[in-house]
Image (spheres, rainbow, N blue to C red):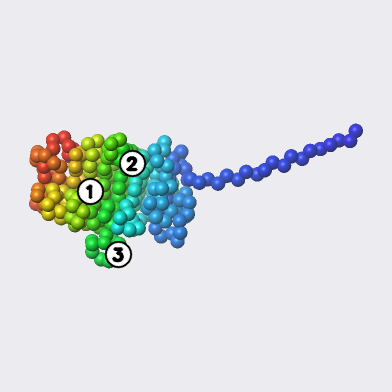
Amino acid sequence: MKSISFRIILPILVFSLSQRTANGQTIWCVDASVSSSGDGTTWATAKKTFQEGIDAATPDNDPPDQVWVKTGTYKPNSATDSFILEAGVRVYGGFAGDEELIPISDTHDPRVFDSNHHPMNQTILSGEIGSPGISDNVRVIVTAPANDSDYILDGFVIEAAREHGLTAIGNLSGGSSGSFRNLIVRDNINDGSNSSDGGGMYIEGDASRPTIDKCLFARNESRNSTGFGGGAIYCFLASADLSDTRFEDNMAQGLVGGGAFHIPDQITSAPHQMSDGRDEFSHVVPHVCHYV
């Protein structure tokens, strides 16, 4: 009997990993010095812009996606653009760009910090675009998501906004209550042209209660002459948990003032770690500003 043999050719499947994972957690790399954006899965193939790194992440992933941003300066594209954070995504600055991609946790952080717990490798989010001066600068540099308490922004310098360095604004579904850590928020000047208050940071919404930890607010101003001040931070129908945070040389004009902080109601106490008389609380509601 003649034997018949069969040769089965199986297709070779080539899988291309679209994400860099470590210990089950996804890390996306951003480096402003690369010539063009890669897939973001390694430092060698990093995304070029801050927003590209965030957009690559999956919101509300479990475990949460992390975005690592190398030292350098990153700017929104125009005065009306803003860097938009995503719900549940943890964004970290202060990297040299050669760190091993092991997720940041309570027991592991590869970044190098100074004595004030700010990264030695400064990663700057700047509103300085166009001509020198604030007249054409970015209005809001960073916008946090509403209805989320799991986002993190950690290890950045935020500077030279024309209105707010940061905003955390809730909506009808919930507050903006994530964490801001190891930040330097400086030289953000609300020129009053948009009739808003606050310079360094603006927080709004009954359910909004962000955590502000180990941050420095310096030389921020609110120049709205008919407003309510809050050079460093302005809370409107909102609250905030502050810890180990310093205020230096912040100023405010307006009907009330409050170089450092304004929360509508009555003064109950003054914070520590103020640099001079221009930094002050104005109209603080009991248990609304939780300063520890």
Q: Quadrant of the C terminus?
A: top left
User: Residue at coordinates 28% horizontally, 36% vertically from top-left?
Assistant: 172
Q: Nearer the viewer, residue 223 or 107?
A: 223
Q: Secondary structure at mark 3?
A: loop
The image position of residue 137, as x and y in percent, is 27, 59
Dot 1 or dot 3: first in sequence order is 3
| Callout 1 crowding tier (Cα within 10 Å): few <14, some 14–19, many ≥20 | many
| Residue 232 in view of the camera | no
- Residue farthest top in this picture: 1
Q: Which mark is residue 51?
A: none
Q: How many angstroms separate mark 2 from mark 3 (CA)?
A: 30 Å
User: Residue at coordinates 26% horizontally, 47% vertically from top-left?
Assistant: 167
Q: How many angstroms separate mark 1 from mark 2 (CA)?
A: 16 Å
Contact between labelled residues 3 and 1, with CB atoms less than 8 Å apart: no
Q: Amino acid at mark 1?
A: Met
The image position of residue 170, as x and y in percent, is 27, 40
- Residue farthest right in this picture: 1
| Callout 2 crowding tier (Cα within 10 Å): few <14, some 14–19, many ≥20 | many
Query: Mark 2 = which residue?
Result: 151
Q: Amino acid at mark 3?
A: Gly
Looking at the rendering, which quadrant does residue 150 occupy?
A: top left
